[in-house]
Amino acid sequence: MNISWPVENLSKKKLIAIPLIIAAFFGASIAYNFYRTGSAVPLSLEFSGGSFIRIQNIRQTEMNEIKTAFESEFDTPAEIHGTENGVEIETKADLLGLQENKSAEEIIETILSDIGINREVEIDIETMGSIISLLYKKQARNAAIAALIAMAVILFISLRHFTAIGGILSVIGLDFLGILGGMALLDIPLSLASMAGILLIFGYAVNTNILLSTNILRRKGGTSRERAAKAMNTGIKMSSTSAIAMIALNLITTSPELNQISAILVIGILVDMANTWLMNSGILLRYETRRKKKYHARI
Amino acid sequence: MALLVLALILSTLFIVAPWKEPQPEGAPLPNTIKGPNWGVDITGGSRILLRLEATQADIEFSNPSENSVTNFMERFRENIESPVSLVAGENAGGTSKRITVEVGRYVSRDLIISLLKEGEDIIGFDKGVVSEQTQDLVKNSLKTRVDPYGTLGAQFKPLGRNNQFLQFEVSLGLEEAKKLLGKEGLPEVFVDNKRVIWSEHIRNVVRSLQEGEWGVSFTLTEDGKERFADYTGRKPNISDKKGHPGVIYLDRPVNSVIIFQKDILEFIRNQAANIGLKSAGYSEKANKFVYTTSDRPTTPLNEEHPYYLQVPAIMVEDGQVPAAEENYVLSLIGRGEVNQALLMGERDSFSSIVRKDNLVIDNEPVLPVENTSRLQNESYIGWLNRVVGLESWPTLQSSITGNVENLRRGLRISTGGKDEAEELRIILSQRLPVEVTHISETHLDPRLSTGFMEEAAYAALIAFIVVGVLVYSFYKRFKIVIPLLITMASEVIITLGAASAVPGGLMSIGLPGLGGLIAVVGTGVDHQIIITDEVLGEKFSETKRLPIERRTSRAFSVIFAAAATTVAAMVALAAFGFGAMRGFALVTLFGVLISVFITRPAYARIIGTLLEREKS
């Protein structure tokens, strides 16, 4: 099977166009999600603020009553899931902020006894005040920007080739769009863990694209397409091994954070494959051909 | 190559860390592997975000006299019921002087204005700004309160601008963590087993350097002075206590009795030297633990000074309380001296005497019990000290024992080192300089740890096998697959080892850290493939001519550029990110640096040699 078929045969315009179309599709799903929920991608507790409550010793039959009780008490929608022994409730209410004379547990106990649940229950509460979710958001944004700037600087120093750098940055941009789109479609929340995954993909994109650019621009043997094909060969091998390892991790682990990171890595790798080997190849090949024309023309 | 082997050996050493304490129940890995400092999100614990509430104001004095600022500060301190401190001051041209004051709670601008006098103007007002010194002070105070020996992995991370927020993480349950944070801190000083002074007698604590030794000086109230002089030698039947330790407790659990399992006594005895004691043990007659301080240079006669830990304690052997001890407990209860028991030991060992969280004697519940668990990385003697609230036992100087006159100038406790002096100062002056509110509390579930590591190991194994199969399908040569897998494995071990070598106080390996580990291995495989392809690639006549070394160095130019970018991103992340991100960034950083400089070159060399042999 010839993996590098697209690079060898498709016209440069098609190479650039296909990923853009895919990106448009992702963009649309993000926009749709935004329209539906008010934010581009689902947000985890850390970024949206709210409380996460685990109550043990609750029967499944009581779930709906509890949900209604919470929603009416705090005047904000609540989500409830059943667990082995009890329930988990997610609500936007900031229980910590509401504590005045009663502790958060007491507030919940009152809610439960109001609907007739008087037995002993075990309550675990996590609250993320709206103040710090704002803080986290800000810091996440700052960190991401700083990392991007740092990466761009290094790229500039090591490559010194505007088209190549432009290509890499566009790929990173499209990768980001693709990942967000994937998160919107598959309901993967944006959390600190998923942010880490996104940054990893950026580093990954740099890997694959430097491989591609070095091969097309700096090496000498064969036509530029052949060189691109060689790079793509190596690249696809890389991507598939990483992707498979991540899939294995995702299937086996039950920890939500690791699930998020591995899912994002898989999405990112796949999206990156399309963006790098199709779009960036197209861009660089076009550049190469033009350069040669100019060179030959001068002679 | 040699470097690789050396790194492997060192890392395995750090991961297994045989020199560390055995871990308590519930630790993620079996007890043979003690090295890594697991973050709170893996071991379970609590994360609380604190907000420091302070207000800063800039005041300008138009024609200040010598005492203007001092008068101003005194006036403020008397009228505002919170601590007020001077943050900055400068002469602002001409005869005016500007200062910045910080009030330890939120106050309104009007309140400040109402306290100003003629010639004083408010020129700046910032609600919510906290000075760095204050934030540091709060951080250190709380840390000493919660984790004096640094064994609970308590971490305080500043968050956000204006030094307002502190994120606090510790491997304790949420209730316990909140309790520890919230406590006022009651210091008590015992001399020769007698409670001499406590918080209400202590004033004006400062750090001081005298004759080359750091220490803490403080003044006592009149009452305090009399008591101190009396009990350190002035009273007729009390000998001069110079050279004795002044034993300082912070939040000693009064009204509690300790019930401990006999096995831990051996550990405690052996660890006495670790904390500077001559010996540690237990007195069955007195039903108390006994510490003996070691000889100090300031003790002229090389005397030994034993003292009891001022919380009654009962030893349990083979799960049973001896009859005599039972009577002791009952008498303590009868006299109203205790109303709870603190258990020290494995939970199961108490099963025959504890029922439904109550101590049972003659089949009757007599005392509610609380289980105190020894925490990860905590020594047994550290555990004991934490349970009884024992802070330190500095030696009393002869100049202050038994004499009220000398106390007029205040007491001084010499600690020797500057850091110890600072810690002692914090303990004795327990009031925090600002109001602290909890903004968020997160319980980090310890059940993540049970089976988590098994899962992770299992996943890693599967990933390995899958990658191995895939790589074989690419190259169809075992000579390539095997070194590749070995390199991958080494990278994991070395990165984990390096991360474990970092002391727990600086960095802990949490879930993001594990994510970083994954990242390293993921990119590692990629780079290995790049190297392999470059070395093997003989498609173009040009490459065929190149010797193996040239090929590998071409591969490396690609790898270096990519790695440099990752390094830059990680550094930026570690600098600008906060807690969670930092752990991830650091682990990834270690991994990338290690792999680029050690493992990948090693792999390249191995492949190069194997292929050269093939050719010839």
Image (tube, coloured by chain):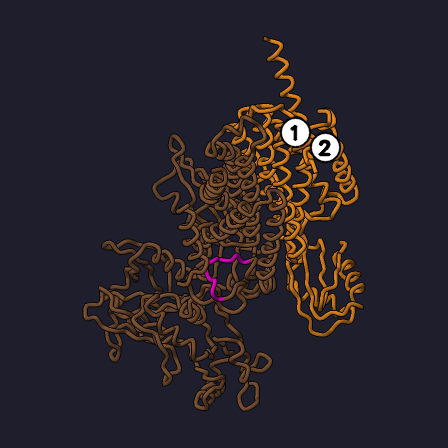
Chain colours: A orange, B brown
Residue type at the position of mark 1 = Asn
- For image coordinates 39% across by 66% down, the residue present is B391
Residue A77 vertical position relative to residue A289 in the rendered view, above or below: below
Residue that label 2 marks? A19
- Mark 2 belongs to which subunit? A
For the residues labelled 2 and 1, the Cα–Cα distance comes to 10 Å
Label 2, residues with CA under 10 Å away: few <14, some 14-19, many ≥20: many
- Mark 1 belongs to which subunit? A
Instruction: Label 1: state its secondary structure.
Output: helix
Q: Which of B13 and B268 is in front in this view?
A: B13
List x then y, in percent, for residue A44.
67, 50
Residue type at the position of mark 2 = Pro
Label 1, residues with CA under 10 Å away: few <14, some 14-19, many ≥20: many
Q: Nearer the viewer, residue B187 or A54?
A: A54
Left or right of residue A119, residue B270 in this image: left
List x then y, in percent, for residue A38.
75, 43
Examine the rendering and report whether any part of residue B73 can be seen.
yes
Magenta part of the protein: which range? B31-40
- Give the main secondary structure, helix, strand or loop, of the magenta stretch: loop
Q: In which quarter of the image is the N terminus of chain B?
A: top left
Residue that label 1 marks? A280
- Indicate whether residue A93 is drawn in magenta: no
